[in-house]
Amino acid sequence: MAGGWELLASETTDANTGSGATIDTGTIAAAKFLKVAVYSVGGANHRIALRFNGDGANTDKYAVTHTFGWQPSGNTSNGTNESLVSQDEILCMGYASGDSQSTIIQIFNPSQGEKLCWIQSLDDEVGNPSAYQGVGKYADNTQITSIQVVNKGSSNMASGTTITVWGADDAGNQSPNPNLPNGAIFEESDTGKHYMFDGSQTWNEVT
C-alpha cells in the first residue's frame, strides 16, 4: 500500500490539438506509485494514449491488453478485445465519437524493471456511455519521470483536455524512527533493567 499521495503535475491544453499532438507533464518527481487522471475533451474520433519519458516512435517498449466499446447497460455485443505488443505507446481508450472521456491510470513504477499499468475510462455519452479497461506495461528499467498524452485519433483533443499526476512511495507504512538523544534511558518492564542509548544505534545496559 502506498503512502500519502502528492500532486506532481497538472497540465491543460488551451487550444485544439490535432492528430499526433502531445500534452507533456514535463519532469516530475520519481515515485514508486503513480496515479494519472486524463480528461480529454471530445472531437470526433479522438483517441488518447500515454508515453513515458519521451519514449515514442519506433521504441516498441509498450504492450497492452484491453477491452473497449462495452456499455454498462449490458450491451456488450459491440465490445472489442485486443492484445497489442511492441507498441510505441499505451492506448487508454477506444475511439470517442465526439464524446469527452475520463480516464484513470494506476502505475507501479519501481526504480528497476518493467512498469505495470491498470487503465479504466468512460466516455460522456448521455444515457449509455461506453467503457474501456486494460492492463499494460512499459518495458524499461528507468523510473518514469515524465508522461505524455498523445492523440492517436484522426481529429482534435479540444481545449480543456487535462492530465493530472499524483505520486506516492512506501514511506506511509514504515514505523516512525524517533530521533532519540544520546543518553536516553529505557526501562525494560519485565526485568526492571535500564538501558542507555549511545546516540547512534546501540542501547547499553546500565549496571
Image: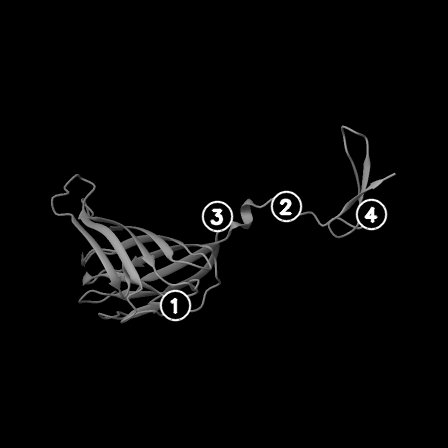
SS category of the residue bearing label 1: loop
Residue to which mark 3 is pinned: 2
Decide which of 123, 153 is in the foreground and name it. Answer: 153
Separation of disc 2 and disc 4 at Cα?
20 Å
Name of the residue lying farthest toward the left? 77
Residue to which mark 4 is pinned: 183
- From this view, report whether residue 103 is shown above or below residue 9: above
Q: Are marks 2 and 3 in contact (CB under 8 Å)?
A: no
Residue to which mark 2 is pinned: 176
Query: Which amino acid is tagged 3?
Result: Ala
Residue to which mark 1 is pinned: 53
Query: Which amino acid is tagged 2?
Result: Pro
Lower position in the chain sequence, tag 4 or tag 1: 1
- From this view, report whether residue 50 is shown above or below residue 207: below
Left-right relation of 178 to 127: right
Lower position in the chain sequence, tag 2 or tag 4: 2
Frontmost of labels 2 and 4 is: 4
- Give the residue at x 22% y 58%: 84
Lower position in the chain sequence, tag 2 or tag 3: 3
Label 4: few (<14), some or many (≥20) within 10 Å? few
Left-right relation of 35 to 199: left
SS category of the residue bearing label 3: loop
Res 119 visible? yes
Label 2: few (<14), some or many (≥20) within 10 Å? few
Separation of disc 3 and disc 1 at Cα?
22 Å
Query: Which amino acid is tagged 1?
Result: Asn
Residue 93, by quadrant, is bottom left
SS category of the residue bearing label 2: loop
